[in-house]
């Protein structure tokens, strides 16, 4: 059974050429992983381009 999280705002992310998902909102990512992130130890690169499928 899958567990889903209801977020207050949509989560923005991009997919890199290597297939990695880059999340653009650290506080929303922290909610997903249950508060395990230390903002000083996390590096997230923002991408202004939208993914097109």
Image (tube, rainbow, N blue to C red):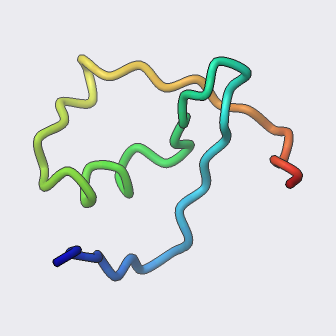
Quadrant assignment, res 47? top right
Position of residue 6 measured from the top left corner of the image (x, y, whole percent): 34, 82
Quadrant assignment, res 26? top left
Which residue: 38% across, 76% down?
A: 7
Which residue: 49% across, 48% down?
A: 25
Left or right of 18? Residue 21 is: left
Q: Which residue is at the far front?
A: 1
Total number of numbered discs in the rendering = 0
Left or right of 8? Residue 50 is: right
Task: Classify 39 as above or below 36.
Answer: above
Position of residue 27 measured from the top left corner of the image (x, y, whole percent): 35, 52
Quadrant assignment, res 37? top left
Position of residue 16 measured from the top left corner of the image (x, y, whole percent): 68, 26
Left or right of 13? Residue 26 is: left
Task: Classify 47 as above or below 30.
Answer: above
Which residue: 38% across, 57% down?
A: 28
Q: Where, quadrant-wise, is the C terminus in this rendering?
A: bottom right
Position of residue 9 measured from the top left corner of the image (x, y, whole percent): 51, 75
Closer to the camera, 46 or 16? 16
Which residue: 55% across, 34% down?
A: 22
């Amino acid at each position: 059974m899958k567990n889903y999280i209801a977020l207050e705002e949509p989560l923005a992310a991009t997919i890199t050429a290597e297939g990695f998902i880059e999340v653009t909102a650290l506080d929303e990512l922290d909610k997903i992983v249950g508060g395990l992130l230390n903002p000083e130890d996390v590096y997230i690169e923002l991408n202004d381009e939208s993914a097109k499928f």
